[in-house]
Structures are given as C-alpha cells and as structure tokens.
Image (spheres, helix red, strand yellow):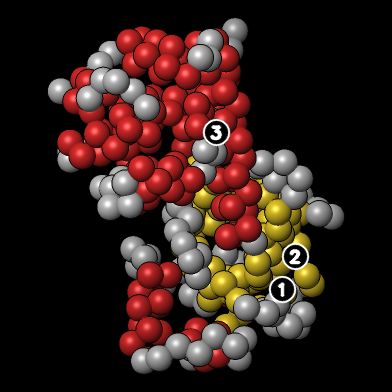
Amino acid sequence: MAQHIAQKLRLTAALLGTVARKDLAAAFRGVNPKTAFDLGRADKWLQGRAQPRELSVYDDWSKLLKLEQPGAWIAESDLPGFTAAICARHGIERAELERRVGAQFETASGHEERSLGLALAGTYACYSRALSPYYRGLLIRGSLSIETGPGAHGLTAAYREALPTGQLLLGGLMTSAKRGLYAHLKETSGEAQFFLCLFPHSRPGSVLGGYLCGTTIIGPEPQPSLTRILMIRLRNPAPERWGGYLPPDGSIVDDLASLGVAIEQPEMIDRQLAQFLAGDSKDGGASQIPPAEFRGILDVFDRHWLRHSD
C-alpha cells in the first residue's frame, strides 16, 4: 500500500533541485516522455490529498532517482527507509537533504504568494447595499484597488466611496487564506473601519465576492451593519468621479458597460447580480440591528450588573 507519497515527492524535488511543480513533472518526462505523472494531479499528490494509482508512475520515479529498488518499493517503503536509500544512492547526508526540503518549501511558498498577489492586483468596481438609513434599499458603488508590496504577504487594499458628504477612503492589509480572502480597512483620516470577508480567490480572478461589515457612515447614530458585496475586476481604473449611490432604476450591467465591461444577456445578468446582493434581506437593504433593540437588552444587563456590583 502506498504511503508518505507527499513527503517522498518533496524529498525527491529537493534532491533534484526542482522548486516548481512543473520542473518536477519535466524531470519525470525526462525518463519517460509518456509518463503518467502530470502537473494537474501532482498538486493533489504533493498536498497529500491523493496518490498515484498507476504503478508506472512509481516505476518512472525509480528510474528518475536511479534506484535499484522497483517502483513498488517506492510506493510501499516507510519514510526513513526511502530517505536512507536516496541519500546513499546520491551521496548526500540526510541532514542536508532535510535542510534543502525546508528551504525549498519556503521558496515555493514565496513563489505562490507572489503569484497570487500578481493575480489579485488591480482595480475593482464594487457594488453593495447602502448602510445609511437615508439611502436604505439602494446600491452604493465603490472602487477597490489591490496592490502588491514587498515580502511574500505584501498585499494592500484601498477602498473608496463617493458619498454626499465627501470621499470616504479606507486602506489596510489584505490576507489570502485557503478558506477565504480577508481585509481590515481603516479610514485614512477618520475613525471608520470596514472588514471584508470574501470567497477564496480563483483564477483568472475576474470577480471577488462576499461580505462587507462595518458601521453606518451617514445617519443619526452608528449601526453595526452587514451587506453582501461584489467586486468586478476592471481592465482600466474607474474615473475619479465614478461611484456613489446607484439610482433606484439603475442597472449594474449598464454601469459596468460605462467602465468598459460589456456583458452579454444584460437583463438576465442584472437579475442575477441583484439577487446575489439582496441575499436574504426582506426589504433589499443591509442587515442591521435597530439600536432600540440592543438598548433594551443593555438596560436589563446594566441594571443586573449594578445591583450586584457590591
């Protein structure tokens, strides 16, 4: 039974000096042009989510490492035995090979992070439900700019809305993880803060979507609010005056067309976008907690706390 395949592949890659998966796949093709080791499945094998089923892959692997043992041995051997065999065959100390594995993992992770940053970088036209009670039910347009910075995790985001009271500009770090894309944005010259919780990025990266959480900016009192948000990637930056509230009868598709994103079947897509942004809202507005409801609960527990404070 095959075991420790992901670790064995990483040891093999470190031994051969193949940093990228495509280089490892090319090495397999070097010993067998018709090898069943392909780049697509190699991702799952290296992540430990699957393992090669074809015995020919292990036979090619044995040839690649110039081992006397057959391919079946590579599949079934324990990790210490496999490591000892390739170290002895290639005259390398085990500690040195393990050091290479660690260094290669850091390098590969850095390459992937930088690649993701380049894939995300750009300008996005954003659509979400207005948080202000004065504009409840309307959509508000904003622009998001994602840039890469120094270091493996150097993603920064800047979000802008054109409000009746002036420009709202927030910025902060953006973090990509397996389960999502996150950004904590703070107003550059004020106290406003938004948090973005988005679906994981997928290539080619034409759209991002998820939730925006924050408090109302325009209103008689701040209200914690939550709204769905869509971010459509633009090929060119939006005009500086673009943004603000979309008229009640406004079309997102028409608005995108004015930014150079022409979509076929506009009526159907408009309905699809509107349905996504409305979510489970009963009146088409953002999800908000009426302050009076919270104050009622606050009154109960404040009184209880004060009665038992002695």
Q: Disc 2 to disc 1, how far (Cα)? A: 7 Å
> In the rendering, at what x and y percent does residue 205 appear?
50, 65
Report the mark closest to the observer, 1 or 3.
3
Task: Kindly indicate the quadrant of the structure image that contains residue 27.
Answer: top left
Label 2: element kind:
strand
> In the rendering, at what x and y percent does residue 93 appear?
53, 10
| Three-letter code for the amino acid on which mark 2 is drawn | Leu
Classify the position of the N terminus by image quarter.
top left
Residue drawn at x 63%, y 58% as measured from the top left: 118
Residue drawn at x 77%, y 80% as measured from the top left: 240
| Three-letter code for the amino acid on which mark 1 is drawn | Leu
Q: CB atoms at circles 2 and 1 under 8 Å apart?
A: yes
Mark 2 lies on residue: 168
**Mark 1 closeness class: few <14, some 14–19, many ≥20 residues within 10 Å:** some
Label 3: element kind:
loop
Whether residue 224 is visible, yes or no, is no
Quick one: label 2 or label 1, which is nearer the N terminus?
A: 1
> In the rendering, at what x and y percent does residue 306 appear?
57, 20
Label 1: element kind:
strand
User: Relative to the observer, which residue lies in front, 210 or 200?
Assistant: 200
Q: Residue 104 shows which numbered tag?
A: none
Q: Is residue 225 left or right of residue 73?
A: right
Whether residue 91 is visible, yes or no, is yes
Q: Residue 17 shows which numbered tag?
A: 3
User: Relative to the observer, which residue lies in front, 235 or 277?
Assistant: 235
Task: Kindly indicate the quadrant of the structure image that contains residue 80.
Answer: top left
Q: Residue 163 shows which numbered tag?
A: 1
| Three-letter code for the amino acid on which mark 3 is drawn | Gly
Q: Disc 3 to disc 2, how far (Cα)? A: 49 Å
Task: Kindly indicate the quadrant of the structure image that contains residue 270.
Answer: bottom left
Classify the position of the C terminus by image quarter.
top right
Residue drawn at x 76%, y 62% as measured from the top left: 169
